[in-house]
Image (spheres, grey):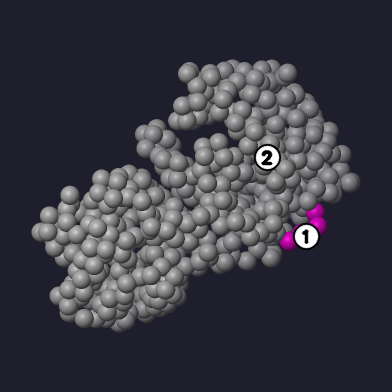
Amino acid sequence: MPSAPAKSWPLPSPASKLAEPHPYPGRLIIVEGIDGSGKSTQLVLLQRWLQARGFRAFFTEWNSSTLVKNATRMGKKKDLLTPTTFSLLHATDFADRLTFKIVPALKAGMIVLADRYAFTAFGRDVARGVSPRWVRELYSFAVRPDVAFYFRVPVEISLARLLRGRAKIKYHEAGMDMHLSEDILESFKLFQGRIIDEYDQMVDEFGLRVIDATLEIDDQQQEVREIVSDMLRETGRDHDE
Amino acid sequence: MSETRGMDARSGPSARTPGRARPHAWFGEGLPYIDISDLTGKLISIEGTDSSGRSTQMKGLREWLEVQGFGVVETGWTRSKLMAEEIEIAKEGHQLNRITFTLMYAIDFADRLENQIIPALKSGFIVLADRYLYTALARARVRGIDEDWVRALYGFALQPDLVLYLKVPTDTLIRRVLQGDGIDYWEAGMDLNLGADPYDSFMAYQSRLLDAFEDLTEDYDFRVIDGNRSIYEIQQDLRREIRDFLDLEDVEGGVVEMEQFTRGPAQGWSR
């Protein structure tokens, strides 16, 4: 009887670009944190500062390419997505932006500011149930950031911030598809709490720069600018060419 | 939920459980949130390059297996609810690079795996897969994509129980293609700039694919079927393989009723 095809596992992991510095003249700065951590506000403030100093900054956001937009929307609406297809759709979006936006901007010597990066997938998708090793290998084509900020905040504070800004928490943001709790606020806390655990593990693994996101906005921004200043100086990009 | 065609027709498990229970295994890391210890069905994949005759042969196998009393579910490359349309649109616009190309096929595969293949196997069906992840591995090799990455990407997949590979030489393939719908941009690998015209490109691309399948045959123990024969002869070989695999000693396996194929494009396909 013919046996099932089997090659011994584990097979070699793909070489990860996240493990080594990129070769491009530009610089890549990314921000991570749970929803309501204030990371987007901080990134916008950083962009203003960089532009005021004469740098050409390029801004890119998670899940913003048009390539798989319809499938993502349809899948979410009809609740067709599994943790794995959810993860792969975001990886496709990321690959599309990386190839057509991020890498060209880095080659052109620009400063790329990314609101969320591969680490969002490592946090969210693992919290949804995919294998941590699998999702890391999936994103092994990602360029290593020059600075990766992690805005750490307790889930209660981020929830309070979100509720102040808008009336409702979004279905997927709360991880309602995972059926952790019937109550959307409770579900948000459980789901985002898992993501915080994942982020905390990534701090050492990927050298994330932790910012205390409970501080005042301007205090956080000052710290962010100091770190970016140091990075630009150390990598010889403290002035625009 | 996604399509589970054969399953809607019958409710509950199929009339006949295919063979002895043999544990299924993941191709790699697997899906931590899915339990596969209770999959009583069998997953049989038919691999082969474009125009190797897979779909005609699958039709014959399905009829035969159903006559034997098995529930059969068919699944095919790029036929998922989630991605089928999206992939077509993206291919038309040529807006894909090699990584996104590979990822979109993986989404299609994952959608069918979780919403169609695994549920069918849980209910004891025989799943016939028209192409499986080996198609992605072969294409990756031809397109120069990091194979370790593609293997890791498909780590979520289930290992098939049996892989039947329809091996057809390129000069036969090109004749079939020309008698059919003609040369397709992607089937000719035109994105790779391998040849001066569609014919040269097709021949160069498909022969590279055949080489890649040749290597995979060794790595993954494909059962090779000589596809350069009549539909009838190929079908007989396929049935023989499946009969042996399923331990169907009590069945008249391997015998094909020619009438079953009168609807197929038999004329153009004989040697």
Task: Give above or below for B260 relative to B120.
Answer: above
**Mark 2 residue type:** Asp
**Mark 1 residue type:** Ala
Inter-mark Cα distance, 1 to 2: 30 Å
Where does label 2 land, which residue? B215
Q: Which of A135/B182 is in front?
A: A135
> Which portion, as a residue range, is magenta?
B19-23
Residue A159's image quarter?
bottom left
> Looking at the picture, how far across and down is residue B18, in whole percent?
77, 52
Left or right: A162 with respect to B157?
Answer: left
- Give the residue drawn at x 69%, y 57%: A8
Query: Mark 1 near mark 2, Cβ–Cβ under 8 Å?
Result: no
**Mark 1 Cα shell of 10 Å, populated few (<14), some (14-19), many (≥20):** few
- Give the residue drawn at x 71%, y 53%: A6
The answer as to whether the residues below labels 1 and 2 share one chain is yes
Residue B157's image quarter?
bottom right
Inspect the magenta stretch and tell me whether residue B22 lies in it: yes
Where does label 1 land, which residue? B21
Report helix, strand or loop for mark 1.
loop
Q: Is residue B146 visible?
A: yes
The chain identifier of the residue carrying mark 2 reads B
Number of numbered discs overlaid on the protein picture: 2
